[in-house]
Structures are given as C-alpha cells and as structure tokens.
C-alpha cells in the first residue's frame, strides 16, 4: 500500500511540475489520461475547513452529464458552479461530531497540468464550534470510474498536524482527530 501511495504521489508531483501552459488542441488531439484521480487540500482552523479540490475536466463533465441525463459543459458560470456544489455535497461527506457540514462553493477555475485541462473548486465548511476532528467520506467520481482514487491532504492549524488520506473503493471513509 505504501509503495502504491508513493507511486501516486510521485506521479502527481511529475504532473504538477510539468508544463502548465494551455495548449491549443482540438478534442481529437487532446491526450486522454489513463488514470482517474482527484486531489484535495484541506485546511482546518477553529470552526472552519476550506477545501480546494482539483479534477480532470473531462471526468467531471462526463459525471455531471450522466447524472443529469444531458450534456454538461464545465465552465466558469453560476450554473456550472451550482451543479458541482450539489454533486460535491452528495459525493463528499464531512461530519463533525453529530453535525454533517455542507460545502459552500466560493471559487472555481480552470488550469492545465501539462496539456490536460483540470478544474478546481474552493469550498468552505463552517461548524458550530471548533473542529477537533471529523469523519470524511470522499467518493466523488467513483460512480463513473471503478478505479477512481481521491487523495485528500489535511492540515490543521494551529497544531500543523497533517494527514494524507487515500480514498479508494475499499476505504472511502476516514476518521481524523486533531486531539490525539
């Protein structure tokens, strides 16, 4: 398992350090990625958690299109953001104590990793009190791709404790405690 995680992190590092300039490619010329992964970074401080999630744009378009039974183009628009926020909150569960928190979308955009279009979203979660831990289930895109992998990196402030969660078919859910 550790070797698999190391391989995935190294692959992501190579992708992130690649050419980030957009390429003017037609759909026929655009390279198709061989793996299905999302990457999320979460910062938790006091009663607030903020998540930035990055997904392959074509995977997200395919999932939203299938979910709504119509063609969905992921773009910068209130409609596209709204569709993602609903989908995210159905696919990602963040439970603090007895409270299930909903993510509120505060930003989105497109970026390129190599020549691959990616889409990112920034979501905020607000709890009733300080977040001392949580249970997270991150199953986004898993209904589309049996081999889907969702990586979530968590950092707590002010303790600076960090966690790396590898959400896959046999382990979508994790409990995280900042008091241990």
Image (spheres, helix red, strand yellow):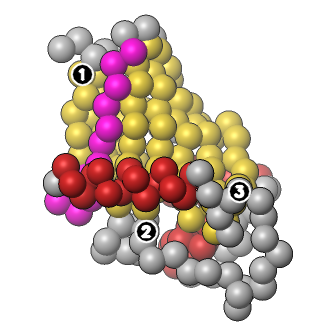
**Numbered range of the magenta stretch:** 160-172
Q: Earlier in the sequence, mark 2 or mark 3?
A: 3
Q: Secondary structure at mark 3?
A: loop
Q: Residue furthest right?
A: 24
Q: Residue at 53% x, 71% y: name it.
A: 59
Q: Secondary structure at mark 2?
A: loop
Looking at the image, residue 140 lies above or below residue 70: above
How many marks can you see? Answer: 3
Spatial CA span between label 1 and label 2: 28 Å
Task: Residue 140: name its quadrant.
Answer: bottom left
Local crowd size for mark 3, using a 10 Å CA cut-off: few (<14), some (14–19), many (≥20): some
- Specify the label residue 177 is tagged with: 1
Query: Horizontal and vertical percent for residue 110?
Result: 72, 56
Tell which tag, 2 or 3, sits nearer the viewer.
3
Q: Is residue 136 magenta?
A: no
Local crowd size for mark 2, using a 10 Å CA cut-off: few (<14), some (14–19), many (≥20): some
Q: Is residue 163 magenta?
A: yes
Q: Residue at 71% x, 87% y: name it.
A: 29
Query: Horizontal and vertical percent for residue 101?
Result: 42, 33
On the question of residue 64 being in view, the answer is: no
Task: Residue 131: name its quadrant.
Answer: top left
- Specify the label residue 36 is tagged with: 2
Q: Earlier in the sequence, mark 3 or mark 1?
A: 3
Q: Is residue 100 left or right of residue 3?
A: right
Mark 3, residue position: 20
Looking at the image, residue 166 lies above or below residue 29: above
Q: Earlier in the sequence, mark 1 or mark 2?
A: 2
């Amino acid at each position: 398992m550790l070797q698999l995680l190391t391989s995935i992190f190294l692959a992501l590092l190579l992708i992130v350090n690649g050419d980030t300039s957009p390429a003017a490619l037609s759909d026929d010329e655009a390279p198709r990625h061989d793996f299905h992964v999302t990457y999320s970074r979460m910062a938790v401080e006091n009663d607030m958690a903020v998540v930035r999630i990055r997904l392959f744009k074509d995977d997200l378009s395919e999932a939203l299109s299938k979910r709504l039974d119509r063609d969905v183009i992921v773009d910068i628009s209130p409609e596209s953001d709204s569709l993602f926020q609903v989908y995210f909150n159905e696919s990602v569960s963040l439970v603090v104590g007895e409270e299930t928190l909903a993510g509120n979308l505060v930003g989105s955009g497109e970026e390129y990793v190599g020549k691959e279009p990616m889409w990112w979203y920034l979501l905020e979660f607000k709890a009733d009190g300080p977040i001392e831990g949580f249970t997270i289930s991150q199953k986004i895109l898993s209904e589309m791709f049996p081999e889907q992998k969702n990586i979530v990196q968590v950092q707590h402030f002010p303790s600076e404790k960090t966690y790396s969660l590898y959400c896959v078919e046999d382990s979508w859910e994790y409990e995280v405690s900042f008091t241990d």
